[in-house]
Image (cartoon, rainbow, N blue to C red):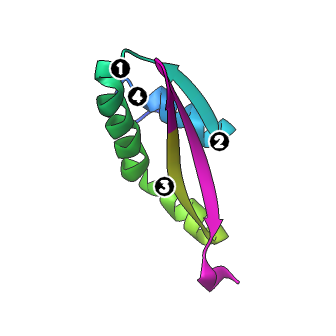
Amino acid sequence: MLTTPYSSRYNPVWEILKKDNTVAIAAMPQLHKRVIKAVLKRKNLDIAFKFSQAELGYRCKIEYQITGNTIIFSLKRKLRLSAL
């Protein structure tokens, strides 16, 4: 796992999401908005990942589904039209 100078508590979630394309987290419903925002921020700050996916012709998007106390994140890769 790569470490950054500033590592947040949500960075391990993002690293697992990059590797496995899906991750589930249990959190209190009051914290769901914060957790979702933090994971999206980790993705946006990972410039190296963005560039590596762009070179392969992909654009990545995080989708999430809330079920009770569980948030299920999934990383969707879409092929860019310019890559065709």
Q: CA distance from mark 4 to mark 1?
A: 17 Å
Residue 4, magenta (yes or no): no
Q: Are marks 3 and 2 in contact (CB under 8 Å)?
A: no
Name the quarter where the C terminus is drawn: bottom right
Q: Is residue 64 above or below residue 67?
A: below
Q: Which mark is residue 21?
A: 2
Quick check: 22 left or right of 70?
right
Task: Classify mark 3: residues with Cα within 10 Å, few (<14), some (14-19) or many (20+).
Answer: few
Residue 7 visible in the current orientation: no
Which stretch is magenta? 65-84
For image coordinates 31% across by 22% down, the residue present is 31
Rendered location of residue 62, percent (x, y): 50, 48
The residue at which mark 4 appears reads as 10
Q: Earlier in the sequence, mark 3 or mark 4?
A: 4
> What amino acid is labelled 4 in the image?
Tyr
The quarter holding residue 8 reads: top left
Left-right relation of 22 to 28: right
Task: For marks 1 and 2, give the one nearer the viewer.
Answer: 1
For badge 1, the amino acid type reads: Pro
| Label 1 crowd (10 A; few <14 / some 14-19 / many >=20) | some
Estimate the spatial distance between the alpha carbons at disc 1 and disc 3, rounded to whole Å. Answer: 32 Å
Q: Which residue in the structure is indicated by mark 3?
A: 48
User: What is the number of the mark on residue 67?
Assistant: none
Secondary structure state at the residue bearing disc 1: helix
Residue 29 circle label: 1
| Whole-percent x, y for residue 72 in the image | 55, 31
How many numbered marks appear? 4
For marks 3 and 2 on the same chain, the one whose residue lies earlier in the sequence? 2
Does the residue at mark 3 contact the one at mark 4 (Cβ under 8 Å)?
Answer: no
- Which of the image's four quarters has the N terminus? top right
